[in-house]
Image (cartoon, rainbow, N blue to C red):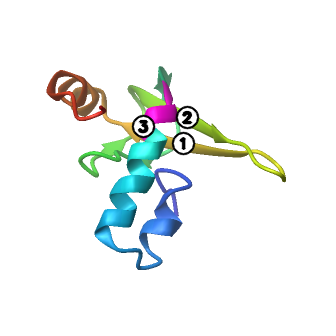
Amino acid sequence: MFGSGYNDHRMKLGYPAHSREIMMQNFYNRAHWRMQFALWPRRCAVSQRWCWLNWHYSGTATWTGSGDDAVETHWHHHDEHLFWILKGSHE
């Protein structure tokens, strides 16, 4: 019901693991992160923990093309985002 972002449906379509990693890396290369209050329940893209009724990180990437722009959003739990930054998993 409440997914973590646009990328969820692509993960369920049966793409190979390597293809999913490339899609996620493309997202993380483009994403702009900001601290945002999660009023509605969201899943953390790193740990699958719930982000709800607290301040968490929201990453947004905009994909442009010949048609309308597509906006992809992923959420990180505030603890997981800190570890993700410290580990350097985003590069």
Q: Tell me, yes or no, whether the two marked residues, 2 and 1, touch with CB atoms within 8 Å.
A: yes
Q: Secondary structure at mark 3?
A: helix
Q: Position of residue 5 (x, y in %)?
A: 52, 51
The amino acid at mark 3 is Tyr
Q: Which mark is residue 20?
A: none
- Kindly identify the residue that appears in the image at 17 percent across and 22 percent down: 86
Q: Which residue is mark 3?
A: 28
Judged by its main secondary structure, the magenta piece is helix
| In this view, 39 is above or below 2 | above
Q: Tell me what residue is drawn at x 35 percent, y 36 percent.
A: 76
Amino acid type shown at disc 1: Thr
Q: Earlier in the sequence, mark 2 or mark 1?
A: 2
Residue denoted by label 2: 60
Q: Nearer the viewer, residue 49 or 13?
A: 13
Residue shown at the point (15%, 28%) measured from the top left:
87
Q: Which residue is mark 1?
A: 73
Question: Is residue 46 depicted above or below 31 in this figure?
Answer: below
Q: How many marks?
A: 3
Residue at far right of view: 67
Among numbered discs 1 and 3, the one appearing first in the sequence:
3
Disc 2 residue type? Thr
What residue range appears in magenta? 28-32
Most foreground residue, 48 or 65? 65
Side of 18 relative to 14 (left or right): left
Which part of the image, by quadrant, shows the C terminus? top left
